[in-house]
């Protein structure tokens, strides 16, 4: 949490939170107890004197207040803009003799108009805040800047770069802090998985300039605290307590966990320049599919209430050629984004019969340019597996061990 920026964007974010709280009829004390935080923190969020460093606390607040899917999207957009305003205010002022144009020149198209360079400089701080926990946006051809396994450091945001080159890191380039959890060796890939030959990369007409957008990714969205399940190839005694959404990427990496049955991914797409970017289409691509994992199922929460429906794109990974379909009132593509008007998309992938590795591709156009960015989970495909007849374990409140789940009926 940081002090409020005093900006109009921060005031609007506080107004939305306060409105949800008032409508819910819940007191600060009740909300604080349900959210496991202090009443003073929530009060400061609602009066605009503090802004959450991440969106997750605000989303949990909104869900407890029974926000609608439309309100959740609007709140997320408002937080992005408020966080961008905070970044602009806190950015150090360059000394008078410093000149920023040469650095911008290196990442723009040849001989760009002066207005484009100025717009890129002005939007740099806004672009930087799109970072999520694990974010990789790939150009049409896999870029450099990763280790031998193609993994990016946790917490790094990479904008799509020219084909065949590394993306440009825009935020969070420091490695994530080491997990306090024991980190066993990651389990080997399922021997039954059959690799699928990837489609050839789409050509990008303008190969000497980065894509004019960034994509922030939350790879494990909890529709409610109990919605996320993971499959882990370890006995309960070797698995630590369940993780919150914020800690889920580290928890999953520590135990080699794979999303069980369903995985919801959030994408925050934002333009980086003066021009509007049209998002033409979002596609799902299967990279491998095999028999479901014979691992234990671990729930990240117990005893939750009803789920708040969220606008999303749904994909059945069991289909031969899966496609994204709209769900919960979600509008189909195309969309438009800019530096000041981002969009947030939720993709819910599910399987009942397979272990599936998958990623996404986003087609865009802006002016006379067109391109495609590839979206995955920190340099590797997303992975979701069915949990056919697998033992399940819960971690009830007040307990210190995993308890085997009873089967209904």
Image: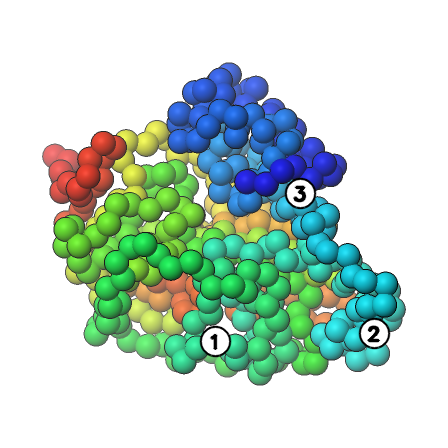
Whichever of callouts 2 and 3 sits on the residue coming sooner in the sequence is: 3
- Disc 3 is placed on an element classified as helix
Q: Report the residue at 40% width, 31% height from top.
A: 36
Q: Position of residue 186 (x, y in %)?
A: 26, 67
Mark in front: 2 vs 1? 1
Q: Which residue is mark 2?
A: 112
Q: Position of residue 60 (x, y in %)?
A: 46, 36
Q: Quadrant of residue 106?
A: bottom right
Whichever of callouts 3 and 1 sits on the residue coming sooner in the sequence is: 3
Q: Report the residue at 60% width, 24% height from top.
A: 19
133 lies above or below 144:
above
Q: Which residue is mark 3?
A: 82
Q: How many marks?
A: 3
- Residue nearer the viewer, 293 or 51: 51
Distance Cα–Cα, label 2 vs label 3: 30 Å
Can you see residue 44? Answer: yes
Q: Quadrant of residue 224?
A: top left
**Neighbour class for label 3 at 10 Å: few (<14), some, many (≥20)?**
many
In the rendered structure, the answer to whether residue 118 lies left or right of residue 358 reads right
Distance Cα–Cα, label 3 vs label 1: 31 Å
Q: Which residue is mark 1?
A: 146
Q: Report the residue at 49% width, 38% height from top.
A: 57
Q: Position of residue 226 (x, y in %)?
A: 32, 39
- Label 3–label 1 contact, CB within 8 A: no
- Disc 1 is placed on an element classified as loop
- Assign the N terminus to one quadrant of the image: top right
């Amino acid at each position: 949490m940081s002090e409020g920026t005093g900006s109009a964007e921060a005031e609007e974010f506080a107004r939305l939170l306060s409105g949800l709280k008032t409508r819910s009829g819940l007191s600060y004390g009740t909300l604080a107890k349900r959210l496991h935080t202090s009443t003073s923190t929530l009060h400061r969020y609602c009066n605009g004197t503090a802004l959450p460093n991440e969106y997750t606390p605000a989303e949990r607040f909104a869900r407890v207040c029974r926000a609608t899917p439309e309100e959740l999207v609007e709140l997320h957009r408002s937080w992005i803009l408020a966080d961008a305003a905070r970044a602009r205010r806190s950015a150090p002022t360059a000394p008078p003799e410093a000149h920023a144009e040469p650095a911008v020149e290196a990442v723009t198209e040849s001989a760009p108009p002066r207005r484009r360079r100025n717009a890129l400089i002005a939007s740099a701080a806004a672009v930087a805040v799109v970072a999520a926990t694990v974010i990789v946006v790939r150009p049409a051809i896999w870029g450099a800047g990763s280790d031998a396994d193609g993994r990016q450091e946790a917490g790094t945001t990479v904008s799509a770069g020219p084909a065949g080159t590394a993306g440009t890191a825009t935020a969070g380039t420091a490695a994530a802090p080491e997990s306090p959890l024991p980190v066993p060796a990651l389990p080997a890939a399922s021997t039954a998985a059959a690799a699928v030959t990837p489609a050839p990369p789409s050509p990008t007409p303008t190969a000497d300039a980065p894509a004019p957008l960034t994509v922030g990714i939350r790879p494990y969205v909890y529709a409610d605290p109990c919605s996320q399940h993971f499959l882990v190839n370890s006995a309960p005694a070797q698995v630590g307590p369940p993780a919150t959404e914020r800690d889920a990427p580290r928890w999953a990496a520590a135990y080699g966990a794979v999303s069980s049955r369903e995985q919801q991914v959030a994408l925050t797409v934002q333009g980086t320049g003066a021009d509007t970017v049209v998002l033409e289409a979002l596609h799902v691509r299967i990279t491998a599919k095999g028999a479901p994992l014979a691992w234990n199922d671990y729930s990240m929460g117990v005893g939750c209430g009803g789920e708040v429906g969220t606008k999303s794109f749904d994909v059945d990974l069991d289909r031969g050629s899966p496609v994204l379909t709209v769900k919960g009132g979600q509008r189909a593509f195309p969309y438009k984004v800019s530096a000041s008007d981002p969009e947030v998309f939720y993709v819910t992938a599910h399987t009942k019969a397979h272990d599936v590795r998958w990623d996404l591709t986003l087609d865009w156009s802006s002016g006379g340019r067109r391109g495609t960015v590839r979206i995955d989970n920190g340099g590797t495909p997303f992975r979701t597996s069915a949990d056919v007849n697998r033992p399940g374990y819960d971690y009830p409140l007040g307990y210190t061990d995993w308890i085997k789940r009873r089967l209904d009926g």
